[in-house]
Amino acid sequence: MEYSSGLATRTRSAWLTKVPAITATFWVIKVLSTTVGETFADYLAVNVGLGPLVTDAVMMTVLAVALFLQFRTRQYTPWIYWLCVVLVSIVGTQITDFFTDTLGVSLYVSTTVFAVILAVVFLTWYRQERTLAITSIDTPRREAFYWGAILTTFALGTASGDLATEALSLGFRTGTIIFAGLILVTWLASRFGASLVLTFWIAYVLTRPLGASLGDLLTQSKDFGGLDLGASATSLLFFAVIVILVVREQLLVNKHGVAVKGQGPLGGARGDYAWAGAAAVVIAIAGAGLSALHSGTTTPSAAVVAPAAGATAPVTKVVHPTTKLGNLTAFATITADLQAKVAASDLAGGKTRVKDLEVAWDDAEAGLKPRDSAKWHVLDGQIDEVLTALRAANPSQAGCAAKLTTLAGTLNQYDGV
């Protein structure tokens, strides 16, 4: 879907159009920014240890600063605009996760609520401005409506994507194909006369679950059907491609704030498709290469979380081949290690070791959750209880031991080696 690259200044405003031309590179950056945003938020919350509440507060503050810069500009500035998109993708995802994980709101409810909110935003926007055209973002009020819609689409995309994953048990491979197919259908509809505004926003919502599925495909363990690049390598790869494409966009912007798609190696319609295609090829080649390199230099995922030195081996487990979750040995191994530390009154060591359980469980979510979301939620809740018990200001040895015993029993019951 391609639109005009911009509008002239309005007579009642010194602003120029504040959004980029909707081209092939626009959609590539949008999909990649979704993955980078989600991965970075998870890294801060889990790996750095800030937790969801602190991470939410930090990201919302940074987004407020970025939007302040965006509203202060009088023309389209690529690096500021795309910084806002990445941050909005993070906050939009965090809003949905807060409702789902913290408040326990059903994904059916949150998907419906965000869809209604988006409809209200569009209705109010149209009643106030009489247009929803993407190329008419040339006043502060229109831009406020635009970013409100963008934030809601990310929240809706997260909720609807998670709902499809859980309700339909879609893995990231199937999800990537389905969401990419839906975007293709939307593009074809626009080519055959469907409203450009409508198809744009439908595609914008769909790029959120597509980006998440694509990111999971690259980051997840090969045990779950992924390429096992890991979150850090995938994020760096995507971020590098984003930077290159945004720098190109910045070089194309003329003094009137319009990204000129003229002739030459950087501009032109063919050039834009070439850059977008090159980005896709680079990601495919680099992903395959890094995956092969990673598999040749690392041990299987279960070995990554092997017992610490001196820890006891996990107890013998009963095999339950009908359980859809599959091999849970890695998590049982850490749990047994934690039980040994707690039994030896090493609660400080347990607090340190439980970080491995948190990271391993978070990393495996995209691979495990679609297999059996009900059982995944049971384990997720029990792991949260273990984390809370060991990280308490004054942890109780008996309380920690009880939580770990419950978790170990559930892992044994759900294991499907």
Image (cartoon, helix red, strand yellow):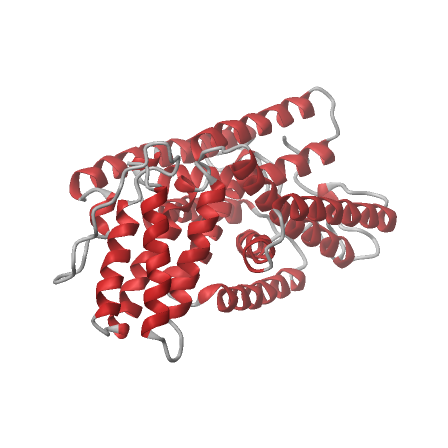
**Residue placed farthest to the bottom in the image?**
394
Quadrant containing the C terminus is top left
Q: Residue at coordinates 83% horizontally, 50% vertically from top-left?
A: 124
Q: Position of residue 336 (x, y in %)?
A: 24, 57
**Percent position of residue 136, x then y:** 75, 45
In the rendered image, residue 397, in percent from the top left (x then y), is placed at: 31, 73
The N terminus lies in quadrant: top right
Looking at the image, residue 370 lies above or below residue 33: above
Q: Nearer the viewer, residue 7 or 134?
A: 134
Seen from this angle, which residue lies furthest top?
192
Q: Is residue 8 visible?
A: no
Q: Residue at x 57, y 64 (%)?
A: 60
Quarter of the image where one finds residue 335: bottom left
The reply, left or right, for residue 274 in relation to residue 199 is left
146 lies above or below 26? below
Residue 411 coordinates in the image, percent (x, y)? 34, 48
Viewer-proximal residue among 120 and 372: 372
Number of marks in picture: 0
Query: Which of the two residues, 128 or 223, is positioned nearer the viewer here?
Result: 223
Q: Is residue 337 visible?
A: yes
Where, by quadrant of the figure, is residue 197 drawn?
Answer: top right
Q: Is 313 placed above or below 60 here?
A: above
> Looking at the image, which residue is at 36% across and 35% down?
282
